Image (cartoon, rainbow, N blue to C red):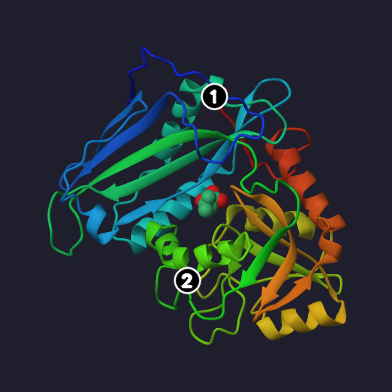
């Protein structure tokens, strides 16, 4: 499919990358493509970044038929630009699309759109340490109609934002609170998809946790509120008595993270035993109490690898690894980011060059 490009006549001034807050500045261009029932995806185009015009009756504003993704473009020391496992994000978006009754985007058009947009905005891919260009693809229902049913028209949009660390803490440990009242996902629901509704459902508890000084909440399963699921902005992993354990994604209530999957592959290559299984909150707290909880970290595209230094449960606080970044956590961060920024060899073939 041909992607038409209309370049901006007013390029924006680029922000300073020093401590740049996450998701605040946007590059000069965006990708748009429409879907119309009976026609399919059409009018793929790159245009200057700017406001979208929507009728107040636009269906997504009422019924949240929307999905998104998050991936990054990295600048190597040689000045080249590369993506990290974009096809994983493309496939996950199409799995989300299936659940939300949104038409899938052909994989080849999607990848072409990502590469063409990043190449158009290549000057926006920062080169400072720990920075990258965060790419946010999203699709939403655009029918101007009130009535709860599957829409007939959609807009696929990709925007880009130069970013540093997701958490203001940087690579320093974060504090998380286990949420024992509210839930993020239930079995049979949308937990495994990246839909805006999942994040809306998490706001009430996250906001309360933030007010109490925590970066995020750690969600328990929505059935028994007994098993660890995910943090919302990242998946979680624990090193308990030398083994790495992480919640399984099989029950479709946890987001199947691309960084999660990559870290598991890296750990296996390092000969670590990794268990993807149910982890009860009781098991985690017992390990924290008897000292076998050695390290804890989150994994996500935005956060990459984020050490967890404190876990709070029912008003008790448990410090992990003296609130310091653990040896394995640091090694995983170095390995994953080393591949992403092209500093270390990529034995998995994960990196996709753009230009
Ligand atoms: C990502 O890690 O890319 C995400 O989409 C998480 C989001 C909360 C920033």
Residue at the image position 78 percent from the left and 37 percent from the top: 345
Q: Where is residue 254 in the image (x, y as percent from the top left)?
A: 53, 68
Task: Specify whether tag 2 is near ligand 1 (CB below 8 Å).
Answer: no
Residue 280 lies left or right of residue 255; in this view the side is: right
Task: Identify the mark at residue 240; answer none if there is no mark.
Answer: none
Q: In which quarter of the image is the N terminus?
A: top left
Residue 1 versus residue 326: which sits nearer the camera?
326
Task: Identify the mark at residue 124; answer none if there is no mark.
Answer: 1
Q: Which residue lies furthest to the front in this view?
A: 211
Residue 196 lies left or right of residue 267; in this view the side is: left
Q: Where is residue 224 in the image (x, y as percent from the top left)?
A: 53, 87
Q: In which quarter of the image is residue 33?
A: top left
Spatial CA distance of label 1 from label 2 is 34 Å
Q: Where is residue 295 in the image (x, y as percent from the top left)?
A: 80, 65
Residue 253 versus residue 207: which sits nearer the camera?
207
Give the structural element (helix, strand or loop) at label 2.
loop
Residue at the image position 23 percent from the left and 58 percent from the top: 62
Q: Which residue lies furthest to the top in this view?
A: 9
Task: Name the residue tied to disc 2.
Answer: 184
Say how many tags the image has: 2
Mark nearer the N terminus (1 vs 2): 1
Q: Do the residues labelled 1 and 2 touch (CB within 8 Å)?
A: no
Q: Position of residue 73 (x, y in %)?
A: 58, 34
Asked whether residue 347 appears in the rendered view, the answer is: yes
């Amino acid at each position: 499919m041909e992607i038409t490009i209309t370049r901006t006549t007013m390029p924006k001034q680029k922000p300073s990358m020093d401590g740049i807050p996450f998701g605040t500045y946007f590059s000069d261009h965006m990708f748009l493509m429409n879907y119309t029932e009976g026609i399919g995806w059409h009018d793929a185009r790159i245009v200057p970044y700017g406001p979208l015009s929507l009728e107040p009756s636009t269906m997504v504003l009422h019924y949240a038929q929307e999905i998104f993704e998050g991936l990054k473009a990295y600048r190597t020391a040689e000045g080249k630009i590369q993506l990290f496992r974009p096809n994983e994000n493309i496939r996950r978006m199409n799995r989300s699309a299936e659940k939300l009754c949104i038409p899938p985007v052909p994989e080849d058009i999607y990848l072409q759109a990502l590469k063409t947009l990043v190449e158009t905005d290549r000057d926006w891919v920062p080169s400072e340490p720990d920075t990258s260009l965060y790419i946010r693809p999203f699709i939403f229902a655009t029918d101007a109609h009130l009535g709860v049913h599957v829409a007939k028209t959609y807009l696929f949009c990709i925007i880009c934002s130069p970013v540093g660390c997701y958490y203001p803490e940087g690579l320093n440990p974060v504090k998380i609170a286990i949420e024992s009242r509210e839930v993020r996902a239930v079995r049979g629901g949308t937990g495994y998809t990246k839909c805006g509704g999942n994040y809306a459902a998490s706001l009430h508890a996250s906001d309360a946790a933030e007010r109490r000084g925590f970066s995020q909440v750690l969600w328990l399963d929505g059935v028994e509120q007994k098993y660890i699921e995910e943090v919302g902005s990242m998946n979680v992993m624990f090193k308990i008595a030398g083994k790495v354990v992480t919640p399984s994604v099989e029950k479709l209530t946890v987001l199947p993270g691309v960084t999660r999957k990559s870290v598991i592959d890296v750990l296996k290559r390092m000969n670590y035993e990794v268990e993807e299984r149910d982890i009860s909150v009781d098991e985690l707290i017992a390990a924290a109490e008897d000292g076998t909880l050695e390290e804890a970290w989150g994994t996500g595209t935005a956060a990459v690898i984020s050490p967890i230094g404190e876990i709070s449960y029912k008003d008790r606080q448990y410090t992990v690894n003296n609130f310091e970044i653990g040896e394995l956590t640091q090694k995983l961060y170095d390995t994953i980011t080393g591949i992403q920024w092209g500093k270390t060899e990529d034995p998995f073939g994960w990196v996709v060059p753009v230009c």
